[in-house]
Image: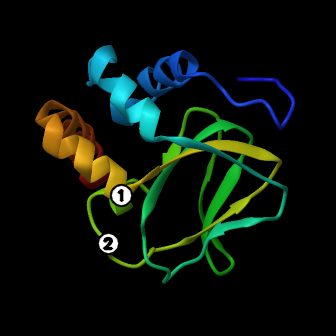
Amino acid sequence: MLSRPPALMISTVEKVLFLKSIDLFSQIPGEDLTAVALISSEERRDQGDEIFAEGESGDALYLVIDGKVRVHKQDRVIAELGERECFGEMAILDAAPRSATVTALTETAMLKITREDFQEIMTEKPEIAMGIIKVLTRRLRDAIR
Protein backbone atom coordinates (compact mmCIF):
# COMPACT_ATOMS: atom_id res chain seq x y z
CA MET A 1 0.00 0.00 0.00
CA LEU A 2 2.64 2.54 1.03
CA SER A 3 5.89 2.40 -0.86
CA ARG A 4 8.37 4.58 0.96
CA PRO A 5 11.84 4.30 2.48
CA PRO A 6 11.96 2.37 5.78
CA ALA A 7 12.90 5.49 7.78
CA LEU A 8 9.84 7.51 6.71
CA MET A 9 6.86 7.39 9.07
CA ILE A 10 3.28 7.66 7.84
CA SER A 11 1.32 10.74 8.87
CA THR A 12 -1.65 10.77 11.25
CA VAL A 13 -4.00 11.46 8.31
CA GLU A 14 -2.60 8.46 6.40
CA LYS A 15 -3.04 6.32 9.55
CA VAL A 16 -6.69 7.42 9.90
CA LEU A 17 -7.42 6.56 6.25
CA PHE A 18 -5.64 3.23 6.66
CA LEU A 19 -7.55 2.39 9.89
CA LYS A 20 -10.87 3.25 8.22
CA SER A 21 -10.07 0.68 5.47
CA ILE A 22 -9.68 -2.13 8.04
CA ASP A 23 -12.71 -4.23 8.92
CA LEU A 24 -12.06 -4.04 12.68
CA PHE A 25 -12.32 -0.23 12.62
CA SER A 26 -14.88 0.15 9.81
CA GLN A 27 -17.74 1.03 12.18
CA ILE A 28 -15.83 3.81 13.96
CA PRO A 29 -16.27 7.45 12.84
CA GLY A 30 -13.20 9.13 11.32
CA GLU A 31 -12.87 11.69 14.10
CA ASP A 32 -12.63 8.89 16.68
CA LEU A 33 -10.07 7.08 14.53
CA THR A 34 -7.76 10.08 14.92
CA ALA A 35 -7.39 9.16 18.60
CA VAL A 36 -6.56 5.58 17.60
CA ALA A 37 -4.08 6.80 14.95
CA LEU A 38 -2.28 8.89 17.56
CA ILE A 39 -1.62 5.88 19.81
CA SER A 40 -0.45 3.63 16.98
CA SER A 41 3.22 3.16 16.22
CA GLU A 42 4.80 1.95 13.02
CA GLU A 43 6.89 -1.22 13.15
CA ARG A 44 8.87 -2.92 10.42
CA ARG A 45 10.02 -6.53 10.39
CA ASP A 46 12.33 -8.41 8.06
CA GLN A 47 11.38 -11.65 6.32
CA GLY A 48 11.56 -14.52 8.82
CA ASP A 49 11.28 -12.32 11.94
CA GLU A 50 8.98 -13.61 14.66
CA ILE A 51 6.52 -10.88 15.65
CA PHE A 52 5.26 -12.76 18.69
CA ALA A 53 5.20 -16.36 19.92
CA GLU A 54 2.42 -18.64 21.10
CA GLY A 55 2.16 -18.51 24.88
CA GLU A 56 3.57 -14.99 25.24
CA SER A 57 1.46 -12.43 27.04
CA GLY A 58 -0.78 -10.65 24.55
CA ASP A 59 -0.35 -6.90 24.80
CA ALA A 60 -0.99 -5.43 21.34
CA LEU A 61 -2.93 -5.51 18.09
CA TYR A 62 -1.07 -5.36 14.76
CA LEU A 63 -2.36 -4.04 11.43
CA VAL A 64 -0.48 -4.96 8.24
CA ILE A 65 0.30 -1.88 6.13
CA ASP A 66 2.46 -3.73 3.64
CA GLY A 67 3.88 -7.26 3.45
CA LYS A 68 2.69 -10.67 4.57
CA VAL A 69 2.67 -12.63 7.84
CA ARG A 70 1.99 -16.25 8.75
CA VAL A 71 -0.08 -17.20 11.80
CA HIS A 72 0.89 -20.70 12.92
CA LYS A 73 1.01 -23.25 15.73
CA GLN A 74 4.36 -24.97 15.28
CA ASP A 75 4.22 -26.40 11.72
CA ARG A 76 0.44 -25.98 11.25
CA VAL A 77 -0.44 -22.82 9.31
CA ILE A 78 -3.61 -21.15 10.59
CA ALA A 79 -3.59 -18.15 8.23
CA GLU A 80 -1.49 -15.99 5.97
CA LEU A 81 -2.40 -12.33 6.25
CA GLY A 82 -1.48 -9.33 4.15
CA GLU A 83 -2.23 -5.69 3.54
CA ARG A 84 -5.16 -4.23 5.53
CA GLU A 85 -5.51 -7.34 7.69
CA CYS A 86 -4.97 -7.48 11.42
CA PHE A 87 -3.85 -9.98 14.02
CA GLY A 88 -3.59 -10.03 17.79
CA GLU A 89 -6.94 -8.25 18.10
CA MET A 90 -8.00 -10.34 21.10
CA ALA A 91 -5.05 -8.87 23.01
CA ILE A 92 -6.59 -5.39 23.08
CA LEU A 93 -9.49 -6.80 25.10
CA ASP A 94 -7.91 -9.70 27.00
CA ALA A 95 -4.44 -10.36 28.48
CA ALA A 96 -4.58 -14.12 27.86
CA PRO A 97 -1.46 -15.74 26.39
CA ARG A 98 -1.07 -15.62 22.59
CA SER A 99 -2.84 -18.57 20.93
CA ALA A 100 -0.41 -18.76 17.99
CA THR A 101 2.94 -17.55 16.67
CA VAL A 102 3.13 -14.88 13.96
CA THR A 103 6.13 -14.67 11.62
CA ALA A 104 6.86 -12.19 8.82
CA LEU A 105 6.81 -13.96 5.43
CA THR A 106 8.14 -10.87 3.66
CA GLU A 107 9.52 -7.52 4.75
CA THR A 108 6.47 -6.20 6.61
CA ALA A 109 5.30 -2.76 7.76
CA MET A 110 2.65 -2.69 10.48
CA LEU A 111 0.87 -0.41 12.89
CA LYS A 112 0.98 -1.57 16.51
CA ILE A 113 -1.63 -0.54 19.09
CA THR A 114 -0.99 -1.54 22.70
CA ARG A 115 -3.78 -2.78 24.95
CA GLU A 116 -3.02 -0.22 27.65
CA ASP A 117 -3.31 2.74 25.23
CA PHE A 118 -6.35 1.29 23.49
CA GLN A 119 -8.21 0.64 26.75
CA GLU A 120 -7.63 4.24 27.79
CA ILE A 121 -9.23 5.45 24.54
CA MET A 122 -12.16 3.03 24.91
CA THR A 123 -12.82 4.49 28.37
CA GLU A 124 -12.89 8.02 26.94
CA LYS A 125 -14.84 7.08 23.80
CA PRO A 126 -17.18 4.11 24.37
CA GLU A 127 -18.34 4.28 20.73
CA ILE A 128 -14.91 2.94 19.73
CA ALA A 129 -15.43 -0.09 21.97
CA MET A 130 -18.91 -0.60 20.49
CA GLY A 131 -17.51 -0.53 16.94
CA ILE A 132 -14.88 -3.13 17.81
CA ILE A 133 -17.42 -5.34 19.61
CA LYS A 134 -19.76 -5.25 16.57
CA VAL A 135 -17.01 -6.41 14.23
CA LEU A 136 -15.74 -9.14 16.59
CA THR A 137 -19.29 -10.39 17.16
CA ARG A 138 -19.90 -10.57 13.39
CA ARG A 139 -16.61 -12.48 12.94
CA LEU A 140 -17.59 -14.95 15.67
CA ARG A 141 -21.02 -15.50 14.10
CA ASP A 142 -19.43 -16.06 10.69
CA ALA A 143 -16.92 -18.53 12.19
CA ILE A 144 -19.59 -20.70 13.80
CA ARG A 145 -21.93 -20.85 10.79
- Residue highlighted by disc 1: 115
Of mark 2 and mark 1, the one earlier in the sequence is: 2
Q: Nearer the viewer, residue 116 or 103?
A: 116
The structure's colour scheme is rainbow
Snapshot quadrant of residue 38: top left
- Where is 49 relative to 97, above or below? above
For image coordinates 53% across by 79% down, the residue present is 54
Q: Give the left or right position of residue 122, taking residue 95 as reference.
A: left
Q: Position of residue 100 (x, y in %)?
A: 52, 72
Distance from label 2 to label 1 (Cα)? 8 Å
- Residue highlighted by disc 2: 95
Residue type beneath disc 1: Arg
Is residue 26 visible to us here? no
Q: Position of residue 144 (x, y in %)?
A: 25, 54
Residue type beneath disc 2: Ala
Q: Give the left or right position of residue 9, taking residue 81 as reference.
A: right
- Where is 65 relative to 20, above or below? below
In what element is the residue under mark 2?
A: loop
Q: Nearer the viewer, residue 96 or 7?
A: 7
For image coordinates 27% across by 66% down, the residue present is 94
For image coordinates 30% across by 16% down, the residue present is 31
Q: Which of the labelled discs sits on residue 8, or is there none?
A: none
In what element is the residue under mark 1?
A: helix
For image coordinates 27% across by 17% down, the residue present is 29
Determine whether label 2 and label 1 are within 8 Å by CB: yes
Circle 2 packing at 10 Å, graded few (<14), some (14-19), many (20+), is some
